[in-house]
Image (tube, rainbow, N blue to C red):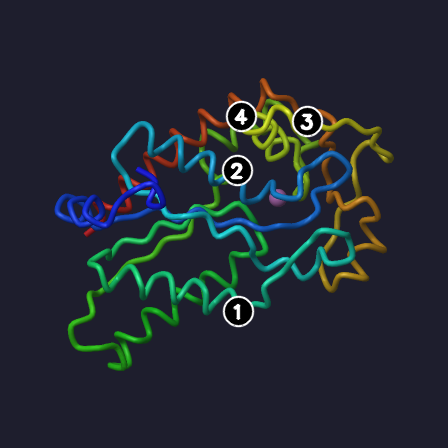
Amino acid sequence: MLLQLCTWQEVEAYLQRSTGIIIPIGSTEQHGPTGLIGTDAICPEAIARGVAEETNVLVAPTINIGMAQHHLGFPGSITLRPGTLLAVVRDIVDSLTRHGFDRFYFLNGHGGNIATVTAAFSEIYAQCSLGTAPPDRLPVRCKLANWWMGAQVKKLSKSLFGDAEGSHATPSEVSLSYFAYPNAVKTAEMSPKIAPKGEIFDAADYRRRFPDGRIGSDPSLASIEAGEKLYKAAVSDTLESYRSFLKFQ
Ligand code: NI
C-alpha cells in the first residue's frame, strides 16, 4: 500500500492491524558519468514498492533529498543541511505518531544520510527520555536500514562486481536504478576504469579528488539484468528485516 494512494479511512483501517510503516529515504546528487541523479532515492523507493506488492505494509512517500553537501561541486546535486534533514525526519515521525504509528522503518539509499538520520532518532527518543514529549505520546521505535547492506544484496554485489563495486556510483545501485527506469540507461567510457578511493570532506575537495564523481567503482559494468537480480534480493532482504523489526519486543 502506498500512503499517497490511500484515503484517510484506509489508513485508519490499516492502523487497526499494523502500526508500522516503511519510509524510503534517498538523495538527489550526482552519480558519476552514467548514474542518474535520483539513484539514491530511486533504489529504496523501488524496493519499498516491491515489498508493498508482496505484503500489505504501508509505504510513505520517499524523502527524495538528503544530506549530500559533498556532491555540490556537480550540477544538479541538492542537499539539505544536517539540521534541516534532522528536522524533516523528526517532523515526519511526529506527524505519523499522532495517528498511532509507532514503528518507523527508514529504507535508506544514501550513506551520507546515516549520521543525520541516526541523530534524528536520538532526538525523537530524547523527547520521551527527558519527559518533554506530550504525556499521551506513544513510545516509538525507529530503524535505519541501508538496502545495499542486506545479506543477499551484499553477496550478489560481490559476485557480480567484486572490487569494481566501490562506494559511490556503484554498479549495483546504477543497475538497480536502470531496472527501475530502463529508458534512462546511459553509457560512457570510464577513465580510469576503477575510480580512486578516499575520504570525503567538502564539495570542492570532493570534485578535485574524484573528478567524475565516482569513488572506487566501475559503473560501466551496470546492467538492467543485474538490476533485476539485485532488486529481487533487496526486496527479500527488506521483507525479512522489516518483519524482524516489527516482531522485536
Ligand atoms: Ni548512491
Mark before the other along the chain sequence, 1 or 4: 1
Neighbour tally class for label 3: few under 14, some 14-19, many 20 plus, Cα within 10 Å: some
Q: Which residue is mark 1?
A: 84
Label 2 beta carbon less than 8 Å to ligand 1: yes
Mark 3 vs mark 4, CA separation in Å? 21 Å
* Label 4: which secondary element: helix
Q: Does residue 152 sit above or below 133 in this rendering?
A: above
Whether label 3 touches label 4, CB < 8 Å: no
Circle 1 residues within 10 Å: few <14, some 14–19, many ≥20? some
Q: Position of residue 72 (x, y in %)?
A: 73, 58
Name the front one of labels 1 and 4: 1
Decide which of 35, 119 is in the foreground and name it.
35
Going from the N terminus, do you reach mark 3 or mark 4 first? 4
CB of residue at label 1: within 8 Å of ligand 1? no
Quadrant of ligand 1: it is: top right
Q: Which mark is residue 156?
A: 4
Disc 2 from disc 4: Cα separation: 16 Å
- Write down the quadrant of residue 96 in the picture: bottom left
The tag earlier along the polypeptide, 1 or 3, is 1
Near mark 2 (Cα within 10 A), the count class, few <14, some 14-19 or many ≥20, is many
Residue 185: mark in rendering: 3
- The location of residue 107, given as percent across then percent down, is 43, 46
Q: Amino acid at mark 3?
A: Val
Q: Report the disc number at residue 106.
A: none
Sequence-wise first label, 2 or 3: 2
- Distance from label 2 to label 1 (Cα)? 23 Å
